[in-house]
Image (tube, grey):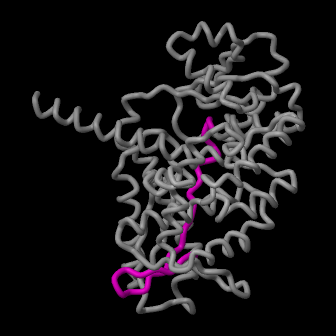
């Protein structure tokens, strides 16, 4: 009995730790989801963001990303970081500044990073800022593991090249960074993608906040995706504020239009829902799913899906390490940031996948170090809070 209790306590401790780190990682995850506002409001917010970008306390963000953000804003583009700089999420801005200051401190030639950003992002939508921040976070993870002398690698003549070079002791290290985006066939991503598409097409019609609740984890069938998309499309025209729908596979969902009265009547969730609806974002869709006992257990299907996705990404990047690009004297590292489909996941899952992929390459005498990050490195605010006092 005592052993069982200890096991439960240990499991809960691990779960809470994972949850906190996953919540922290949403600081960087949310910036891929820019809100759409009426044009006049949007222009005013962009101007506010650009003014904030020139504030000395935001010098790190301005140093690395300022040119790209200004260029994107001039084109009418936006991203989470511009929204955050406009005053909607000062905590996210503080985290980004801390990450970038630490990133700059471990680079052999920091100005190469600025050149890399301009080269890779100037002609891309501002959503690409998120992908480059994955590279920043990967460098921080490795630097905290003892890697040093990081050098950004600039693309040359269209030849495949890794993202960074570094040193571990005296050995050259070649580093490739990839983003394992969350699945596009789960309820949350399907619903949010459809809502954003419809709101972009008709912001007046899709002007109400909405909540979707469900208890399903895992991919949806094509038929279920089609029904869910139709349900989102129907939200403005259905008379009832709350609808219960069953998707293909017997998956029940509830879609609720969130009026002020409903938010007030939601009891303990009222404050959270109110914050979600008034935190500076345009009317959106909130997807809620309860935590189940099964969510705290090992999930074989999740392990298999991660292995297949990660192995495909590693295989696509193999040309940067092997063949004509090989260097027998270098250590080759590929580091992937995993956007897990669930808030909770078994912490052993990334490690199992790392080992499996490394073993597959080792079986044919190819050495490759694989790192999968399930959460972002915590921001080290000592890099910025000291600066704030001196500015």
Residue 260: image x %, image y %? Answer: 69, 11
| Residue occupying image coordinates x 71% and y 55% | 54
In the rendered image, which quarter contains the N terminus?
top left
Residue 116 in view (yes/no): yes
Q: Is residue 294 left or right of residue 200?
A: left
The answer to whether residue 360 is above or below residue 210 is below
328 or 218: which is nearer to us? 328
Q: Residue lying at the far left in this picture: please name it.
A: 2
Which residue is at a point 64% across and 28% down the rendered structure image? 286
User: Whole-percent x and y of residue 372?
Assistant: 44, 60
**Total marks in image:** 0
Above or below: residue 164 compared with residue 222: below
The picture places residue 375, in percent across and down from the top left corner, at: 45, 51
Camera-side residue: 253 or 381?
381
The quadrant of the rendering that contains the C terminus is bottom right
Tell me if residue 189 comes above or below residue 336 in the rendering.
above
Question: What residue is shown at x 62% (from left), y 35% (from top)?
Answer: 187
Residue 54 located within the stretch drawn in magenta: no
Residue sitting at x 52%, y 54%? 390
The percent position of residue 349, horizontal first and vertical second, equals: 38, 53
Q: Which residues are magenta?
A: 163-188
Q: Is residue 174 left or right of residue 54?
A: left
Could you tell me if residue 374 is visible in this image?
A: no
């Amino acid at each position: 009995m005592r052993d069982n209790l200890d096991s439960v306590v240990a499991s809960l401790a691990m779960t809470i730790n994972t949850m906190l780190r996953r919540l922290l990682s949403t600081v960087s995850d949310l910036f891929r989801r820019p809100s759409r506002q009426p044009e006049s409001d949007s222009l005013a917010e962009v101007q506010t963001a650009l003014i904030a970008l020139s504030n000395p306390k935001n010098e790190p963000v301005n140093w690395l990303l300022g040119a790209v953000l200004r260029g994107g804003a001039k084109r009418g583009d936006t991203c989470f970081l511009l929204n955050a700089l406009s005053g909607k999420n000062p905590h996210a801005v503080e985290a980004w500044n801390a990450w970038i200051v630490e990133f700059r401190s471990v680079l052999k030639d920091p100005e190469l990073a600025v050149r890399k950003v301009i080269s890779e992002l100037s002609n891309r939508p501002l959503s690409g800022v998120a992908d480059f921040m994955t590279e920043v976070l990967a460098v921080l993870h490795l630097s905290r593991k003892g890697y040093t002398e990081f050098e950004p690698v600039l693309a040359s003549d269209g030849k495949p090249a890794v993202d960074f070079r570094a040193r571990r002791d005296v050995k050259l290290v070649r580093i490739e960074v990839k983003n394992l985006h969350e699945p596009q066939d789960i309820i949350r991503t399907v619903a949010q993608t459809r809502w954003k598409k419809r709101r972009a097409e008709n912001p007046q019609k899709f002007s109400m906040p909405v909540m979707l609740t469900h208890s399903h984890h895992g991919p949806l069938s094509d038929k279920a995706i089609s029904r869910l998309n139709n349900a989102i499309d129907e939200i403005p025209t259905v008379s009832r504020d709350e609808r219960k729908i069953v998707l293909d596979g017997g998956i029940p969902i509830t879609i609720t239009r969130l009026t002020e009265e409903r938010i007030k009547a939601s009891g303990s969730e009222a404050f959270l829902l109110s914050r979600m609806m008034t935190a500076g974002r345009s009317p959106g869709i909130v997807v809620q799913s309860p935590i189940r006992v099964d969510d705290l257990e090992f999930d074989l299907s999740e392990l298999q899906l991660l292995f297949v996705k990660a192995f495909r990404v590693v295989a696509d990047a193999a040309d940067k390490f092997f063949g004509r690009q090989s260097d027998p004297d270098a250590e080759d590292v590929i580091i992937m940031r995993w956007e897990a489909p669930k808030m909770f996941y078994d912490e052993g899952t990334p490690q199992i996948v790392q080992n499996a992929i490394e073993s597959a390459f080792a079986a044919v005498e190819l050495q490759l170090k694989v790192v999968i990050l399930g959460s972002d490195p915590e921001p080290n605010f000592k890099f910025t809070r000291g600066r704030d006092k001196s500015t």
